[in-house]
Amino acid sequence: MNRIILMLFAMLIGTNGYAENGYDLWLRYKPVYDTNKTNIYRSVIKQIYVAGESKTIAAATMELQIGIKGLLSRSLKSVRHINTDGTLLLGTPITSATIAKLRLAELSRVGNEGYLIKSIRINGKSCLVIAANTDIGVLYGSYRLLSLIQTGQSIQNISIVDHPKIQLRVLNHWDNLNGTIERGYAGYSLWDWQRLPGYLDPRYTDYARANASIGINGTVINNVNASARSLTKDYLIKAAALAQVFRPYGIKIYLTARFSAPIEIGGLKTADPLDPEVIKWWKRKADEIYSYIPDFGGFLVKANSEGQPGPQDYKRSHAEGANMMADALAPHNGVVMWRAFVYENIKGEDRAKQAYQEFKKFDGAFKSNVFIQPKNGPIDFQPREPFHPLFGAMSKTQLMLEFQITQEYLGFATHLVYLAPLFKETLSADTYSKGKGSTIAKIVEGKLEEHQRSGIAGVANIGSDINWTGHPFAQSNWYAFGRMAWNPDLSPAVIADDWLKMTFTNDSSFVAPVKEYMLASREHAVNYMMPLGLNHIMNLGTHYGPGPWDKITGWNAHDYHLADDEGIGVDRTDKGSDAVSQYFPEVRAQYNDINKIPPELLLWFHHVPWKYKMASDRNLWEELVYRYYSGVSAVEKMQDKWDRLEHKIDPVRFEQVKQLLAEQQREAAWWRDGSVLYFQTYAKMPLPAGYKAPLRTLEHYKQIKMPDRINK
């Protein structure tokens, strides 16, 4: 009994005097030591000299005070004169005469958000300078300095010059006004609409701190399936209160605008974008919003998709709808982010082709403050898709790439799936739109076509759970999105290494094995869910668990795999739906040829015979089975690795991940067994030698139901 009580007590307080519950995210400022157990940074940073009095500079100062106290186990003394070695100087050439006198040429390269961190001598004293052209640049530089210390990197004789490659780096929250979150798996919405604007939860500040630390500078606070009430005075006042909290951290508020709002809250009889009264209504509404939120970012719009209202209801085009809203925002420098996710649940043309067909013809027709926002792939955030064909196809239009951070199709907040490799796969994809090297990263950065604006968005996985994201490792996907939005060239390995050290420990015996699994985890999930280019074969009601047998009205799972006695896969070649024609010739030639296409996309573009010989020397059926079983085996190996790390981190988070990995293993086996048994009814071949048959029948797996979730 006493042993049990002691174990519970240890779990409650952790190893540092309180429970590690994940709330601090990657901003855990725990002491950093070298191998001799001495702090290696105390001689470099002894005091702080702050130039500037803005709220942003105050936020930077506060963060450095908190961080240094935790990391170096000392309080930073604030000084007004540099009279000793080890001074940390913050400021801009405008706020600091000392920085202005330094004439730091590097500042000419960093723009409005970049920064310089540099070791320098001032008045004969060794100093560390964080300089920028603006206060927000100083804040970003402060977070960078703290991250260097957290990850054990040297800050002696340092010289770092950095700036974001993408201008708008935005989180899309699919939060509803009733507190639920569509496709959110970490509790309820952070936004307490009932108590706003009077009560500002301290968590709003911590949310802003976390985002600023990774360079996110915008947040859409309401669902793309929007309620028009979000644009009413009562809710604008609430949004303005949030904007006041976020502003010092460089984060702008955006709102999803429901296209039919002029009817629903404006008293008009139409929402026709060419109607003069509708045009006036949106201009007045934009003026009203900016009266409450002077730095309001703009509108996100989902129109004429999945039943949402839009300009096509009035026989108008997407361009006419987007431009009308853009004109209303233009006097205030606001933008419209018009989603390219457009489909109705009515069978017809290949769904993968629909966005291209609707938007390509309007290339060049959109106003300069409009972004078209395609998802990373042409269907719907599947575990793996080819890149969206609109990238490269709309050279005259600003495109804002949309990723999904929340794991709608990748095990919710139960499965450990690190998404940075998925992000990188898309960003590094070559469209060949202007020859070899025309990557999506260059398009999104605006460099390829020299667009004036650039942007990237991620559908947030954040909720009211104490650790923000449900699964402790789901935090890494929020972190990775921010890091790659700032710099798409970063590698998933570098990001994982930093995140593990900042979030758990610098102990290499923990970081190395966990990082190895993180980097492979997305591929493992693809294998036990939808290998070889299969997609959208989950349970269609919940988007959770296998459902290749699902048949509902409209598009159903069979439409996405088309398994029959001959083979499996969707023919999108020039002999099928011809979706390959939407890509440039170099890409088209690869996707169209069954001998050239990467096996990871084989069944996306080809209907392949079951006995087709793969490069592995297995036939297609054997390869499919191999992938399903290897995915489950990989999760089992991760369980074993994790169990060996029990004493490397705090007991609370260790136990939470341990239990979640066990659940992931059970569900991976559910995916494998149900899918293999179902596809076997078409392949009519036995399992290859060495594979253990599922314990239950196909009918058993068909009957398993995912419990309803209030925030599904």
Image (cartoon, grey):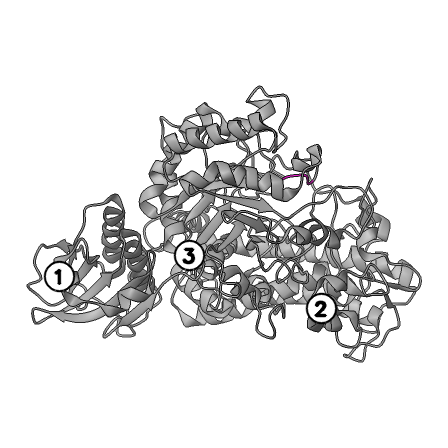
| Residue 656 horizontal/vertical position (percent) | 52, 52
What residue sits right under mark 3 in the picture? 650
- Mark 2 residue crowding within 10 angstroms, few (<14) / some (14–19) / many (20+): some
Q: Residue furthest top?
A: 267
Q: Nearer the viewer, mark 3 or mark 1?
A: 1
Residue identified by numbered label 2: 600
The quarter of the picture where residue 683 lies is bottom right
> Which residue lies at the image location 69% right of the left edge and 46% below the top edge?
543
Check whether the beta carbons of the residues at disc 3 and disc 1 lie within 8 A of each other.
Answer: no
* 272 sits to left or right of 450: right
Q: Is residue 4 above or below residue 623?
A: above
Give the image location of residue 354, x and y in percent: 73, 50
SS at badge 1: helix
Q: Which residues are magenta?
A: 301-305
Give, as a three-letter code, the residue at label 2.
Glu
CA separation in Å, label 2 and label 3: 38 Å
For label 1, the residue is 98
In the rendered image, is residue 445 in sight? yes
Residue at 25% x, 44% y is: 55
Of badges 2 and 3, nearer the viewer stands 2
Q: Secondary structure at mark 2?
A: helix
From the viewer's perspective, is residue 250 above or below residue 155? Answer: above
Q: Is residue 550 above or below residue 390?
A: above
Q: Position of residue 646 (x, y in %)?
A: 47, 62
Which comes sooner in the sequence, label 3 or label 1? 1
Foreground of the two, 575 or 4: 575
Q: Nearer the viewer, mark 2 or mark 1?
A: 1
